[in-house]
Amino acid sequence: MGRITLTGIEKAFGHVEVLKGIDLDIGEGELVVFVGPSGCGKSTLLRLIAGLDRPTGGRIEINGADVTRVGAADRGLAMVFQSYALYPHMTVRQNLSFGLENIHMPKPEIATRIAEAARMLEIEPLMERRPGQLSGGQRQRVAIGRAIVRNPTAFLLDEPLSNLDAELRVSMRAELAALHDRLGTTMIYVTHDQVEAMTLADRIVVLRAGRIDQVDTPLGLYNRPANLFVAGFIGAPNMNFFAARIAGGQAVLPGGLAVPVPGRAAEGADITIGIRPQHMRLADPGAPALEARVTLVEALGAETVVHATLADGERILTVLPGQPGLERDAVVRLAFDSADLHGFDGAGQRLPEP
Amino acid sequence: MATRLKHMAGAAAVAPLALLARVLDPPLRALQRVAGQGGMITFFLVPNMAIFGIFVLLPLCINFVYSMTAGPELFLAQRDWVGGAQYAKLLDCEDYTRPATCDEDLFWTAVWNTARFVVVQVTLLVVCATVTALILNRELRARGFWRAVFFFPVLLSPVVVGLIWRWILQRDGILNAAMLDLGLDPVNWLIERGWAFAATVGVTIWAHLGFYALILLAGLQAIPRDLYEAAEMDGTRPARMFWRITLPLLMPNLLVVIVLALIRAVQVFDEAYVLTGGGPGTATLYMTQYIYEVGFASLLKNPGLAAAASILMGGVLVVLTLVQLGLGRRGESKGKAR
Ligand SMILES: Nc1ncnc2c1ncn2[C@@H]1O[C@H](COP(=O)(O)OP(=O)(O)O)[C@@H](O)[C@H]1O
Ligand SMILES: [Mg+2]
């Protein structure tokens, strides 16, 4: 139980359209991540699902029942807020029991549920403290605990890790993934951090300016980005893009290198070719290659990030394995497999498969 | 451009101060050489201490001496020393709950009137201010206008408040005229005991409500909105939301409001005096009015007795003020812990 279906969801604040027609089907037990740049409408969409706001158009269904006009309390969902929103005047135990008391659950059952959640999240020693006496990570656990005890149809999490320091964020991320495996409950997770999205998600929903750009598995997004935006957003460092023209059935890059067209495109068309920094290597002498002048070398030990410029001044970034010993102003010759190329048409959409 | 103008205007406004600072610099430096750094602290504190001493501390002490003397004379030198006799007179009573059995029956009438006033007025005032703040905190149309409307009476002088309401409530006042027009029998608002008491309560609430509502409104706005959203997700009904979320989080502000209102209610005087003059009879005679009349306004002036009564009342106020300071300090240390 935990299937959520959105049909044609629209939301406007006054004259500002924030969501412009969202269709999405979230399966039972799935961990779906909404990802996108700040201000694209992720939180707004999550709040509509939660029932904290009402959409201006469209339908929301939970397990097949239309809940578009149903209040937040009666949707059976639980939310973890970015600010945690713990009740500051209540102890941890009271924070956890508050929602259960609201539905007049018998006291022994409340106690059992709280004990179970506390054990799962390892917050047992904190039960009699108030939120003000907890660290950020502990508050985060309590906030998750408050959601768990309600045994919801689905969890909604709005940037739950963004207030934690980097180290804690990585470990909490792993714990959340483990928690999802263990509970098997549907989760909708909002983040602007594509690494979080890639590591956690069963499926990622990429939002941009109130629309869904692409929905796919993390590797699906990485390997077959539907447009330039997704290609640039997923993967770090960002994908390199070059303007190219189709001539003689081949794509001609700046500097004259001709490569097979990744997809179908008309003769003479202007397209954009994309390649990830990790998919380039130093070319064998004499083999055809992309020539670039090195502007900056960042040696990280296991790998080396090389910034360079092409003949036409276009900037390019590559991540080379190991320590290739490059210097500033050296000329590098870069090679790649044509299978790793991505092609996009003039409108930025992925070229159809050949 | 605009910011540069602002900048220049700011500089122009500061120029006289800068000049003053330059003029004062040499003598102050010289003084510091003589007095040392610690001496400068004293130097800067002295003017304020002097004003406080002359106009507050000294009169307080003189008042205490007065409370040990008797007679109608104004100058201390001409007054008779009686020790604690004035206090004994005030406290001489068979049954404190029945002023008629007391030596100074008016004092005890005033004490009980004031006590009743404090309980009724503070309770109603705090409830009304809370309700007002809750309403003003909602997303209502022309919110700024309504906030101003409720705050406006706070800006009026107490005498003006008393006069306005006397015009409304007196026997041939506006309210009775309106009731006559509607075919109702007029009521002697300020002449019947119960109504007169109610009028002093109502009018002082009207006059002070805005101030306390403002403090509570600030408290309400400091409660994060997402707490309410979390409570909504938790399936909390509105009434429970108020009792379990709003009220506990508003409690620091509410305590301040209660104590401030208590202090002011004990001191009630000007609005009530202008409105009812303490009448009918002694039905709305409150402590401050009693002190004023015994000390200055009655035929049998007795400044010593008035001084003793004011010292007793001061004791009550000191206790309340200590409570308020204690609350303030607790709030501060809590604020630091967060
Ligand atoms: N209550 C509101 N009133 C007006 N505009 C809002 C409101 N909530 C969000 N917005 C606007 O909607 C857009 C999307 O916001 P949000 O969903 O919070 O973005 P994010 O993807 O960063 O979570 C933003 O441009 C924001 O300014
Ligand atoms: Mg957001």
Image: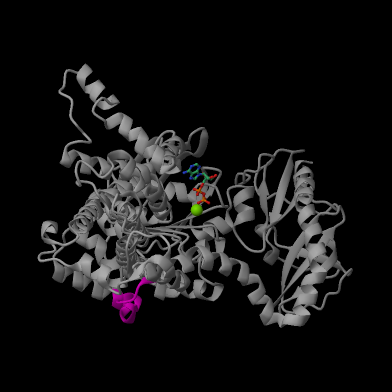
Q: Is residue A324 magenta?
A: no
Nearest to the observer: residue A246 or residue B190: B190
Nearest to the observer: residue A104 or residue A170: A104
Here the colouring is: one colour
Quadrant of res B273: top left
The residue positioned 27% from the left and 49% from the top of the image is B127
Left or right of B7? Residue B326 is left
| Residue A197 x, y percent position in the rendering | 51, 61
The residue furthest front is B78
Q: Is residue A123 magenta?
A: yes
Which residues make up the magenta segment? Answer: A118-131
Quadrant of res B321: bottom left
Quadrant of res A239: bottom right
Up/down of B176 relative to A26, above or below: above
The residue positioned 45% from the left and 38% from the top of the image is B148
Up/down of B131 relative to B140, above or below: below
Decide if residue B327 is in sight here: no
Left or right of A56? Residue B244 is left
| Residue A11 x, y percent position in the rendering | 45, 38
